[in-house]
Image (cartoon, rainbow, N blue to C red):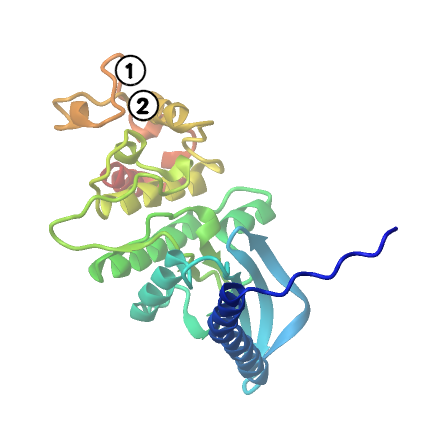
Amino acid sequence: RPPTSPSPPASPGQRAAAREWRRASEPVAAMAEMHDDLAEEVRRSFNAQYETVEVGLLGAGTYGEVFKSTQRSTGLVVAVKKMKLDAEDEGVPSTAIREIALLKELSHENVVKLLDVFCSTKKLLLVFEFVDNDLKKYMRSLGRQLSPNLIKSFSHQLCLGTEFCHARRIIHRDLKPQNLLVDSRQRLKIADFGLARAFSVPMPKYTHEVVTVWYRPPEILLGSELYSVPVDLWSVGCIIGEMATGQPLFAGDSEIDTIFKVFQKLGTPTVAEWPGLARLPDFKPTFPQWSHKGWENIRNVKAQVGAAGVDLLEKLM
């Protein structure tokens, strides 16, 4: 291989550009070092107060991981939601900021308690009270339907927690059995406020891509962007109905399949019954017309919740 010829000397313009690049890169390097120091400081602060339990991973998802820890000073078991922050994003995700801000406003026995927050540029740690079960897992673990008394207790607690949120102008927007924690004393706690919103009057427009589809109310399934606390009340009704029947009420494969399952069980609404129905973006006058049926016709509902429970479901839904 022939020897390479020496590189030509840099021109004055190239030397000036190199000096400019070095000057520009120095603050970036300093900032990266500062960020690393911040991350290390947060890690040390967390580890000084909490000890991660061996094999403590409780769950994982798109948001990050949830693992089990203990508070060193008290021995209290806690759940830590660890969220990795994308370096290219502008800091903490809006869903995390929303969850932190809202939970700091909520202190109620039927709402999960946020105990601590640790944040760096790379990582966000939310420390919650530890509850080892959710309603979905709890119902599955029993291997049988919930007793009428337990359905009544859980329904009461769910209504109390939801009313507390609404009284503080907060819509949860994602109530479902997986987001309701159940402790060893059968206390129910509303969790996962990542989709929640603080609301005001007049109501702003919101995205309709909220609430797991099975627990989504008809107005959102039909494309409404103007909604308020009734979206949570519909979800509460779906959850009570699921506790009574042992299965989701409206387990559709898609939004349209879900809305048809709602109409099949409860009847297709008319414009006279629902003013404004025809103005919803996804409403079609060609929808099938199913006759109205009472809750007594839905399997096991009246036997499990009684006449008062049926009355509550009719008002919620």
Residue at 50 percent across and 63 percent down: it is 183
In-front residue for pair 79/296: 79
Res. 183 visible in picture? yes
Specify whether 281 is left or right of 144: left
- Gap in angstroms between the C-alphas marked 1 and 2: 9 Å
Q: Residue 263 carries which label?
A: 2
Q: In which quarter of the image is the C terminus?
A: top left
Res. 193 visible in picture? no
Number of residue marks: 2
Residue at 39 percent across and 55 percent down: it is 194
- Which of the 4 image quadrants contains residue 43? bottom right
Residue 301, percent from left and from top: 39, 35
Q: Which mark is residue 287?
A: 1
Specify whether 40 is left or right of 315: right
In-front residue for pair 303/47: 47
Q: Which of marks 1 and 2 is in front?
A: 1
Q: What residue type is labelled 2?
A: Phe
Q: Are marks 1 and 2 in contact (CB under 8 Å)?
A: yes
Position of 195 relative to 67 (above/below): above
- Which of the 4 image quadrants contains residue 114? bottom left
Q: Residue 21 carries which label?
A: none
Specify whether 20 is left or right of 215: right
Residue 220, percent from left and from top: 29, 35
Q: Is mark 1 on a helix, strand or loop?
A: loop
Q: How crowded is mark 2: few (under 14 residues within 10 Å), some or many (20 or more)?
A: many
Residue at 37 percent across and 58 percent down: it is 94
